[in-house]
Image (cartoon, rainbow, N blue to C red):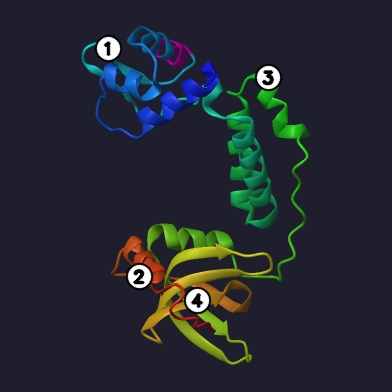
Amino acid sequence: MSRAARLLHLMEMLRRHRQPVRGQALAAELGISLRSLYRDIATLQGQGAAIEGEPGIGYVLRPGFTLPPLMFSEDEVEALVLGSRWVAEHSDPALQQAARAALARIGAVLPPALRAGLDDNGLLVGPARVEAEADLGLLRAAIRQEQKLDIAYRDAAGQRTRRLIWPFALGFFERVRVVAAWCELRQDLRSFRVDRMDRLEPAGERYPLRRAALLRDWRAREGITADRN
């Protein structure tokens, strides 16, 4: 294992633990001497990683640290670029701007050799081919804040209904966006195509369950029912 790979592995090890980890345990997992471990930790600290601790006590990675240059491999940088470009092409304006800003922030802490790969790599994303649809920013805000939404919805047959839904997930597919929600009309979990929402308004109240609980129920049912509106 190269030293660069070892430093990356050390960061991942520290990330897994919320409590201080003794140097002997870290060195043993990496297969290096304790002296080498101390040098590696000093190197990472010098590159901006917020590692706290000292010999004999242990080390912990403080949340919210600044990404050090060795945080990403070339494959990881390409994954970040591809993902950010997809979001910048296929999401709502707020997320598009956030994707570009996040990529620029990551680029600021990468070494020159990797930073060049942010702009001149050959991974491209094609243009979005999605029909006109409701406000994705409003949908994301409702999901994040666990807020009910009042929608006018057209099913596959063109029949219109009014629904009060509890949105908890938003799926991005090649041609459509789909909201997973609890539907008060059907008293069950349902999925709704965003391009079939003729009206979308906040209902002005939180839904009574936590988003995480609804998402767990949805995942538990995945593959069991293919019910679509």
Q: Earlier in the sequence, mark 1 or mark 2?
A: 1
Relative vertical location of residue 172 with respect to residue 76 in this rendering, above or below:
below
Whether label 1 touches label 2, CB < 8 Å: no
* Disc 2 target residue: 217
- Secondary structure found at label 4: strand
- Secondary structure found at label 3: helix
Residue pushed farthest front? 31
Relative vertical location of residue 27 with respect to residue 79 in this rendering, above or below:
above
Chain part drawn in magenta: 41-46
Q: Earlier in the sequence, mark 4 or mark 1?
A: 1
Give the residue displayed 55% in from the left and 64% down from the top: 171
* Disc 3 target residue: 112
Disc 1: CA contacts within 10 A as few (<14), some (14-19) or many (>=20): some
Which of 127/114 is in front? 114
Q: Earlier in the sequence, mark 2 or mark 4?
A: 4
Give the residue displayed 31% in from the left and 65% down from the top: 213
Residue 208 on image: x %, y %: 28, 70
* Disc 4 target residue: 191
* Disc 1 target residue: 54
Q: CA distance from mark 4 to mark 1?
A: 52 Å
Count up the numbered dots. 4
Q: CA distance from mark 3 to mark 2?
A: 46 Å
Question: Which residue type carries mark 4?
Answer: Ser
Disc 4: CA contacts within 10 A as few (<14), some (14-19) or many (>=20): some
Q: Earlier in the sequence, mark 4 or mark 3?
A: 3
Disc 2: CA contacts within 10 A as few (<14), some (14-19) or many (>=20): few
Question: Which residue type carries mark 3?
Answer: Pro
Whether label 2 touches label 4, CB < 8 Å: no
Relative vertical location of residue 21 with respect to residue 180 in this rendering, above or below:
above
